[in-house]
Image (cartoon, grey):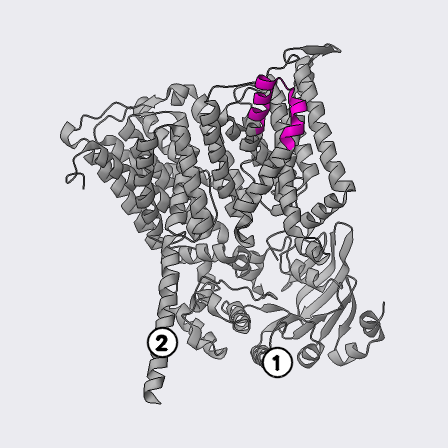
Amino acid sequence: MPYVFTAPWVQDLFIFTVMYAALASAWNIVGGYSGYISLGHAAFFGLGAYAVAILFEHISIGGGYRPFFVLPLVGVAVGIASLPIAWVAYRTRAATFAIVTITLLFVAQQLAFNLHSLTGGSQGATMPTPSFPVATYNVPFYFAMLGILALAMLISWYIRGSKLGLALFAIRDDEDRARGLGVQTSFAKLTSFAVSAGLVAMAGGVWAYYLTFIYPQFAVDPLITIGMVLMVYLGGRGTLWGPVLGAFILVPAQKYLAYQLGASQLYLIGYASVFLVVMLLLPRGILPSLADLARRLRVRHDRERRRVEEAATS
Amino acid sequence: MHVFVQACILGLLTGGVYALMASGLALGFGVMRVINVAQGALIILGAYLSYSLYTSLHIDPFVGLVVLTPLMFLLGTGLQLVFLRPLRDEEREELSLLVTWAIALGIEGILSLAYSTTYRSTITGYADHSWSIGGYYVSVARAYAFIASFAVIGLLFAVLKFTKLGRAIRATVQNPMAARLLGIDTRVVSAVGFGLSVATASAAGAVYGIVFPFNPGSHYDLISRLLTIIVLGGLGSLGGAVIAALFMGVSESVFSAEVSPIWSSFTFFIVLIVVLVLRPQGLFGARVRGSI
Amino acid sequence: MTPLLEVEEARKRFGGVVAVDGCSFTVAAGTITGLIGPNGSGKTTVFNLVTGYLPADAGTIRFGGETIRRPDPTTLARKGLIRTFQQARVFPNLTVVENLALAVPSSRAGSLRPRVTPQEREHAEELLDDFTLTQHKHSLASELSFGQRKLLEFAATLMSRPRLVLLDEPAAGVNPVLVERIEHHIRRLHGEGLTFLVVEHDMPFVMRLCEPVIVLDRGRTIAEGPAADVQLDPRVLDAYLGD
């Protein structure tokens, strides 16, 4: 793709679109499959971003392509690190769970700001610019993000078809009934959360390297969570392609708005409006609504056909 | 020891303001099962409006409340009607979080446009004064804020306990279906209740603006504290919210004085974790091991 | 008579209301035991205590001779105690077969095995056949009628071959033909050795089906014994007709 379109702003658009598609797919594993709305996932994004930056600064893993190879490690590490947090959060349900995750986000932001020695505080953290050839500079980043998206989708697809997915969907429908039948709901919830967090962290790592400098308020930004959530809701919670669809619609729209309106205030209002419109008018999302429509049409078609057949035979 | 007591005093005063803010949030949850993440933004809105009234028209913030409170009440009922009523019952609790978050962002955006992002403060004549009571400093502004907060909380409790509307609200909070069977129009009641909870935001905002500097982005800090407070107190419990608020105010202040001011907001997080591990339903929340 | 479930001095209060006030009874293995009582007798609460959906304030619960310290639905299910719900709770967005596959022990490991293994599918289809739901096997549970959901829920409890099935008002909200079917299934399964505890309001249903019958009133057991005796027990008549 980036070989076809060489204008940097287009490549940048692709990178961000693919990134958000990956983030949305990852969030979907928790928010869509199990129905637990985590509003703090941006914390893991920031964690991944800072992890890569810190590995760079404090352990000198070297430049070039090395940071990309570190990503799986970062993903696994953040996934495991998220478990104790998830365990505490999962002691609650629904709204309280969401509140706990929001708190997580703010805590992560505080940590990013205050742990100067590690994160550089409000001055941010930097990574040396890799010496990729100028003409194809963005290409490695694009493929890295694409790789993460592919991984996220593969994992999502696999989980759907497995017992883990069955358990998660059952939890979404009626967690207590699932428990009553002996389903190990804790295992399912924790696993889904860790996987989701790990994927998000990897995307954060690539993002950090792409920008080469990260500031706490942008790495751990509530707007990132809102973006993920909105895209999943728009495309269809719990579906496989919904989050991707949502990202492919919203990221270009977002970039366009930012370009036209520039000022962040209008941007916020714009975001808020889109969010509200989607929530209130299309709460099930595009793909499920289309599926519903298709089914209704098919039922009507079948009924019509039967009526014709009966008329013909009588 | 002196430092500790001073911190406690300061914490208590701040806690009073938190209490007012949190009780509005708890009320909103109680009547509609809605977590109003926009409460922080509404408080900041109240702070800005109160600030404007003071700087342009020289109306003292407490006096300005006479105008602001009904306005915010109407805003609250409006928001409820347009954005929250359409949500279906089963999903309302969770979706309301997202919807109200969007509203909060919208308010933040509008405020940024109107006022820019510089920090403001409603600096009244008594702002810098402190009384010295028994060797401890008590900031005049904070003392007034505390008194005002509890006056409003008291008013709120009085309305809930002694008026017909209050009883209707309490019935709706406890058991919406039973309330409906008793002839209470729960739709009106929840609209009014929600309006009330937003109205408290105006009072809280006026008070907040006197004591703390604020800008449109301040609502994040606020709402994260408030949410922790109502989880601690137990969702929907007003009394719980007040007690939890005072407790958190003191904890934060003591931690700040004795350990470190930079990490003071961490007390909220630590307390939240402890509460969730030991008693996930909060102090006064209902305890049910799963739904029946 | 081996006791399968023993409840001893269970207590539960909600604020000022004492719902269960030192309630004790036993369910013997291999019986269809009925649990009845007038409104407010606490039978629903006791049911929830026994199945782990409400924490008891006091009292002991023993299942298969083992004292259960903090009853919890998941642990109880793994030990072989499963319940149904009055509202017929199924998983609306899963298919009928998936609803059943979920209730199987191997599902409990979460994990990456396929959603419905061939053995599970076979077992599920057998059950669906027993309950004459086979034509719906690929429908979503949300597409079933209330009566069909009750049957599905019942079938799901059987997937893990439990020792004790607690039925929460199995005849409620269901037409008489279906009530007969449900009764038939209960008898059939009982014949195969399954123990039931049935909470019901429908008196004729209980008296036809259950033996013995436990009667609660005001949070306590007031009678426990053969259906015929309980029916004539003056205390029982008093509880239902008095006040």
**Chain containing mark 1:** C
Q: Amino acid at mark 2?
A: Glu
Q: In the image, is residue B51 part of the stretch drawn in magenta?
A: yes
- Residue A176, compared with residue B208, is above or below; it is below
> Which image quarter: residue A303?
bottom left
* C74 or B82, nearer to the observer: B82
Q: Secondary structure at mark 2?
A: helix
What residue is shown at x 55% (from left), y 61% (from top)? Answer: C77
Give, as a single range, the part of the protein colored magenta.
B46-69
Left or right position of A110 against A73: right
Find the residue positioned furthest to the bottom.
A314
* B113 or C132, nearer to the observer: B113
Q: Position of residue A279 (x, y in %)?
A: 45, 47
Q: Position of residue C20 (x, y in %)?
A: 75, 58
Find the residue positioned furthest to the front.
B57
Q: Main secondary structure of the magenta part?
A: helix
Could you tell me which quadrant the N terminus of chain A lies in?
A: top left
Q: Is residue C114 visible?
A: no
Residue ID for mark 1:
C176
Q: Is residue A200 visible?
A: yes
* B266 or B214, nearer to the observer: B214
Q: CA distance from mark 2 to mark 1?
A: 35 Å
Tag in front: 2 or 1 = 2
Left or right position of A274 against C53: left
Callout 2: few (<14), some (14-19), or many (20+) C-alpha neighbours within 10 Å? Answer: few
Q: Amino acid at mark 1?
A: Pro
**Chain containing mark 2:** A
Could you tell me which quadrant the C terminus of chain A lies in?
A: bottom left
Residue ID for mark 2:
A304
Q: Position of residue B109 (x, y in %)?
A: 45, 31
Q: Secondary structure at mark 1?
A: helix
Q: Position of residue C217 (x, y in %)?
A: 78, 65
